[in-house]
Image: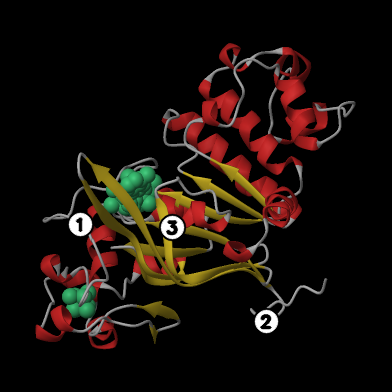
Amino acid sequence: MTVVDETGGTGLLRIDGLVLDYATRGPGTSSRVRALDGADLAVAAGETVGIVGESGSGKSTLGSAVGRLLPRAAVPVAGTVRIAGESVFDLAPGALRRLRRERLGFVFQDPAGSLDPTMRIGAQLRLALGDRKADVTPHLERVRLADVRRVARSYPHELSGGMAQRVAIAMAMAGGPRLLVADEPTAALDAQVRAEVSDMVFALAAETGTGILWLSHDLPAVGRLCGRIAVMYGGRVVEDGPAGEVLGRPAHPYTAALAGAAPARAAFGTRLEPIPGRPPLLTGASTGCAFAPRCPFSVERCTTERPEPRDVEGRSVLCHRAGELAATGLEARA
Ligand SMILES: Nc1ncnc2c1ncn2[C@@H]1O[C@H](COP(=O)(O)OP(=O)(O)OP(=O)(O)O)[C@@H](O)[C@H]1O
Ligand code: SF4
Ligand SMILES: [Mg+2]
C-alpha cells in the first residue's frame, strides 16, 4: 500500500479540526464534555513540540488521540488525525496495532501504568521488542541506567520512580518510533531526576531522529527542551510557533498570561501559577473565543465569533486581535 503523505513529505503527524467529547453518565442522566473543540497541530519528522496549557485544556486527550488510545467514554465528533498520511481513526484494528508498534511510542506520568508488576523488566522489554531471546542490555544502557543486568532481573517495585520511568522510556523507544508522545513523563519525579530524565529523552530522540510531542505544565522546561510550543486552551491550539518566540514574545493573550505566571527565569520544574478566573468546561462548540471571560483584551466580537488560526510573526495564533496586540507588545501589558 502506498502511504500518501499529505503534509508535504516531511510531515509526521497532522491533526485537523479535531473535535472530541467525553460522554459522562450519572444516575438517570447523560451529558457531554467537549474536550477538544477543533484542535489543529502538525509535527514534522524529528521535530520536538511541547504542548502546554492549564489543567483540562485537552493536552492528554490530544496526545492519546494520536494513537487512538482514548478512554472508553471518548466520542470522536469531527476532524482527522494522520500519521504519515494514514488516518488513525479510520484504520482497522490490525493496521492500528501495526501503526502503534512501528511508528509510535507513549510514555505517561506514572511508569507503573506501562509496566507489568508481575514480570521482570528484562522479560517485559523482550515482549515489547517481540523477540524472546533479545539482549535487552543495550536498550537499558541507552536510557542511561547503571547496572543494567541487575535492572533486567528486577521487578518494577524494586526500582525507584526515576529508574522505572527510564525503563518505560526504553520500552517506548524499543521499536524505533518516529514519534514519541510523552504525557507529563517527569511530573512525578523530584526536580534533579526530572531534569536528568527529560534531557536523556531529548538526547536519545535526537540520536534516532524521533519526533517528540511533550505534554507538560512545566513551561520553563518546555521552553528549554522543545523546538516548538503549542499552547492549548479550551480544547484548541491557540498559539503555535518556535519555543523561544512564543515564550519570549507571546502573540496570544492566554500565552502572555501563562508566560507571565511562569516567567522564563522561574526555576526549572516550576508549575504554572493560576491565572485569575477559571478555564471553561465546554459541553459543545464554543460560540466565540473560549478565553474571552478571562481576557483583558476582549471586545464584543470575541464572544460571538470563533477565532480561526492566523499567521502572526511566524506563528499560528487563534485570536481576533492577534496582529494588533502582538504589535503593541503583549507581554508588557498582560
Ligand atoms: N475519561 C474522561 N471522562 C470524562 N471527561 C474527561 C475524561 N478525561 C478527560 N476529561 C475531560 O476532558 C477535558 C480535557 O481533559 P484532558 O485530560 O485532556 O486535559 P489536560 O490538559 O491533559 O489536563 P491535565 O493538565 O489536568 O492533565 C477536561 O474537561 C476533562 O475533565
Ligand atoms: S479573541 Fe478576543 S477574547 Fe480571545 S484572546 Fe483574542 S482578544 Fe482575547
Ligand atoms: Mg493531562
Residue 258 screen position, x and y as percent: 27, 58
Q: Residue 142, can we see it?
A: yes
Spatial CA distance of label 3 from label 1 is 16 Å
User: As shown in the figure, which amino acid type bears the numbered disc 1?
Assistant: Pro
Tell me which numbered mark, 3 or 1, is placed earlier along the sequence. Answer: 3
Spatial CA distance of label 2 from label 1 is 35 Å
Contact check, label 2 and label 1, Cβ < 8 Å: no
- Snapshot quadrant of residue 257: bottom left
Rendered view: 151 above or below 215? above
The colour style of the image is secondary structure
- Mark 1 Cα within 10 Å, few/some/many (few <14, many 20+)? some
User: As shown in the figure, which amino acid type bears the numbered disc 3?
Assistant: Ile
Residue at x-position 69% and y-position 35%? 170
Residue 159 screen position, x and y as percent: 59, 16
User: As shown in the figure, which amino acid type bears the numbered disc 2?
Assistant: Gly
Pointer 1 residue: 279
- Mark 2 Cα within 10 Å, few/some/many (few <14, many 20+)? few
Q: Nearer the viewer, residue 73 or 102?
A: 73
In the rendered image, the quadrant that contains the C terminus is: bottom left
Q: Secondary structure at mark 3?
A: strand
Q: Nearer the viewer, mark 3 or mark 1?
A: 1
Residue at x-position 56% and y-position 36%? 197
Q: Residue 219, can we see it?
A: no
